[in-house]
């Protein structure tokens, strides 16, 4: 049972996420399997290491999302200052261009946040599937008979 599940998970991790997300997601270091050395064996250590690496990918994703949030807040403040300066006086070309640049940067951050959210959702699903597969008892292991 575990061997079959491990093969299914390993196959899934070789490429990018299912459901067409591969065109929107770019995993750091290439495909996740090769990057995290996920070797599923019957021993607990192999499963523990594989799970740990999935959790580390989630932590990295969360850190990148926090950085995006911080960048967004900084750009929003910068945009408000430029818009206020443009509204108070005669709108100078430089102030209008500053607002436009802020809008472009905000659009790029929006796209990055969508990508990170999709990656996080996929990682969360994969971790849940891994945990569910590991929680199922292997019929060969518990046989007393």
Image (tube, rainbow, N blue to C red):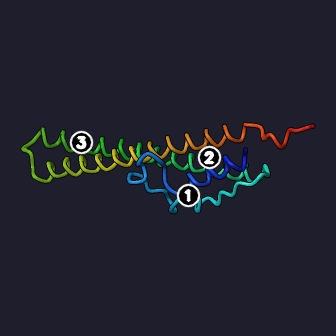
Identify residue for label 2: 55
Apparent side of residue 144 relative to residue 73 in the rendered image (left or right): right
Nearest to the observer: residue 52 or residue 72: 52
Q: Check the picture and name the quadrant holding the N terminus.
A: top right
At 22% from the left edge and 52% from the top edge, which residue is drawn?
101
Q: Residue lying at the far right in this picture: please name it.
A: 145
Where residue 12 sits in the image (x, y, percent)? 56, 51
Q: Sequence-wise, which precedes: disc 3 or disc 2?
A: 2
As helix, strand or loop, the secondary structure at mark 3 comes to helix
Nearest to the observer: residue 84 or residue 51: 51
Q: Sequence-wise, which precedes: disc 1 or disc 3?
A: 1
Apparent side of residue 83 relative to residue 78 in the rendered image (left or right): left
Residue 14: numbered disc: 1
Identify residue for label 3: 81
Q: Does 84 sit above or below residue 34?
A: above
Which of discs 3 and 2 lies nearer the camera? The answer is: 2
Q: CA distance from mark 1 to mark 3?
A: 47 Å
């Amino acid at each position: 049972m575990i061997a079959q599940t491990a093969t299914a998970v390993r196959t899934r991790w070789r490429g990018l996420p299912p459901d067409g997300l591969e065109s929107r997601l770019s995993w750091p270091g290439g495909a996740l399997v090769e990057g995290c050395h996920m070797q599923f064996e019957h021993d607990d250590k192999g499963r523990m290491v594989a799970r740990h690496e999935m959790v580390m990918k989630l932590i990295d994703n969360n850190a990148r999302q926090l950085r995006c949030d911080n960048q967004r807040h900084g750009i929003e403040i910068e945009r408000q200052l430029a818009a206020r300066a443009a509204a108070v006086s005669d709108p100078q070309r430089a102030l209008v261009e500053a607002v436009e640049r802020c809008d472009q940067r905000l659009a790029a951050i929006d796209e990055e946040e969508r990508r990170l959210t999709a990656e996080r959702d996929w990682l969360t699903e994969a971790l849940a599937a891994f945990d569910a597969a590991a929680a199922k008892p292997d019929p060969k292991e518990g046989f007393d008979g």
